[in-house]
Image: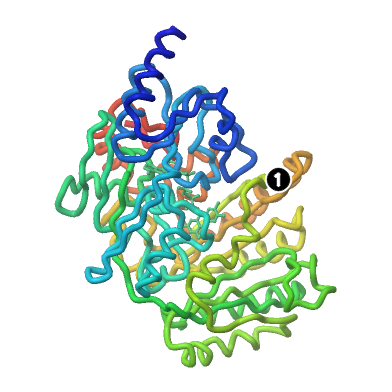
Amino acid sequence: MTTLLNETIEGLKTNVKGLVVLPDDPRYDEVREIWNAMIDRQPAVIVQCAEADDVSHAILFARNNGLEISIRGAGHNIAGNAVCDNGVMIDLSTMKNVHVDAHKRRAYVEPGATLGDFDKVAQIHGLATPVGINSTTGIAGLTLGGGFGWLTRKYGLTIDNLISAEVITADGNKIRTSETENPDLFWAIRGGGGNFGVVTEFEFDLHPVGPEILAGLIVFPFSQAKQVLTQYRKFVESAPEELNVWVVLRKAPPLPFLPEHVHGQEVVVLAVFYAGDIAEGEKLIEPLRSFGDAYGEHIGAQPYVAWQQAFDPLLTRGARNYWKSHNFTELQDGALDAIAEFAGKLPSVACEIFIGLIAGASNRISPSAMAYYHRDAKFVLNVHGRWDDVTDDERCIVWAREFFQASAPYASAGAYVNFMTEEEGDRITAAYGSNYDRLVQIKRRYDPENIFHLNQNIKP
Ligand SMILES: Cc1cc2nc3c(=O)[nH]c(=O)nc-3n(C[C@H](O)[C@H](O)[C@H](O)COP(=O)(O)OP(=O)(O)OC[C@H]3O[C@@H](n4cnc5c(N)ncnc54)[C@H](O)[C@@H]3O)c2cc1C
């Protein structure tokens, strides 16, 4: 058996243009490492793909040898499904090419590109599409689960801007999918994750953005949390969709614009983003300052790409992470009380609760238009447990779970698959609502043997 595998590995090496990395390779540990340090898995074979055909070879190699398959974009997913034990890890992280056709306002993006790779090229032309808020996140995983960020209020989810994709299916074939080519597959990959095949190219619609936008932070004392949250709720009801404001409750990082005595103290942060005329934005955000007696603020015109990296220093790889998440159609008093209570007992300096505002364009799309179902969600709340020491695991996980329970009565239905941990399989049907049955039908057609099952799995 081992000899057979050795022979086929030689065949695999001959077939692929990229690299085949085995456990005895000095690069093995570096290549198998992903963002969440709680995940430590050892694939039998890693195929670092250089082109789409490498993906086909890797799939067929895994199938012929009865090995499980995991798919890695930028390796950010909290559940850690990008890496597997004893199977084949299809590593796309070196396929990072981004091509922009500025005339057509389209971007063609390989699946290993990070949001930073994508934004950088699109912004050369003053263009962008909605993606997430941390530039090292992968475009592939983010898009396939939905994708939202600062531009979502105005331009929708990332999938709402997906025009077509190239997919390698379970039989190793390469197909194109869009509204007109294999439309059922296109419907499924817009929210259905990596269940249906390996995407080797995304085509996105682009919009004029920046290159300068107005953005920054206002930091309030934690003792004013309830009043800030209550006024925030009212403010965002009528704010224009060019304006986005998220709330983060955490211990203050040592930001230079904050007095030193505030560093390490619990604070309430408004993260502000306006993608329109700067002077108009200044007027619109003025009321935010009266929500309380701010410790300090740092807001100004800056390049969109700089703001897209603003949170990177707080979200570096290598920490231990455990997340829980809810959707909300409104922020009821009980939810705000629970947020204030649990932000008052953060179990580590890096733990945080954030409220992402997504109300706007995404709410105007029908829930049945594509796999992503919960179009009524106006806020996505993420309980972000984050710490370094393994001995803090239990304390931090219990805090996140207890807050999740305490805020659950005020949440709306469903869940965002991109924020789900590996233990949350029971939330998958809820995440897709009445779209789930159609997803099962499409899974049966494209992956009847469920070879792509290391994901938020839709069982055929
Ligand atoms: C620090 C941080 C900040 C984040 N911020 C946001 C945010 O602002 N907005 C938001 O919407 N999300 C956000 N996310 C969640 C993010 O969207 C998911 O973690 C996403 O899965 C990351 O994609 P990736 O390619 O890096 O992940 P990976 O771990 O590489 O992949 C995740 C899964 O996606 C599938 N997959 C990946 N690539 C492919 C492919 N080419 N073809 C088929 N399947 C594939 C596989 O099932 C894989 O297991 C954030 C995550 C982190 C860690």
- State the colouring used for the structure image: rainbow
Q: Residue 64 occupies which quadrant of the picture?
A: top left
Instruction: Say which quadrant the N terminus sits in.
Output: top left
Q: Nearer the viewer, residue 368 or 286?
A: 286
In the image, what residue occupies the spot 19% across and 54% down? 179
Give the structural element (helix, strand or loop) at label 1: helix
In the image, what residue occupies the spot 19% across and 48% down? 183
Please name the amino acid that badge 1 sits on.
Val
> Which residue appears farthest toward the left when viewing the image?
180
In percent of width and height, residue 452 lies at: 37, 32
In the image, what residue occupies the spot 69% across and 56% down? 351
In percent of width and height, residue 52 lies at: 30, 39
Q: Nearer the viewer, residue 452 or 399?
A: 452
Please name the residue that numbered disc 1 is placed on.
Answer: 398
In percent of width and height, residue 393 lies at: 73, 41
Q: Is residue 183 left or right of residue 113?
A: left
Instruction: Say which quadrant the C terminus sits in.
Output: top left
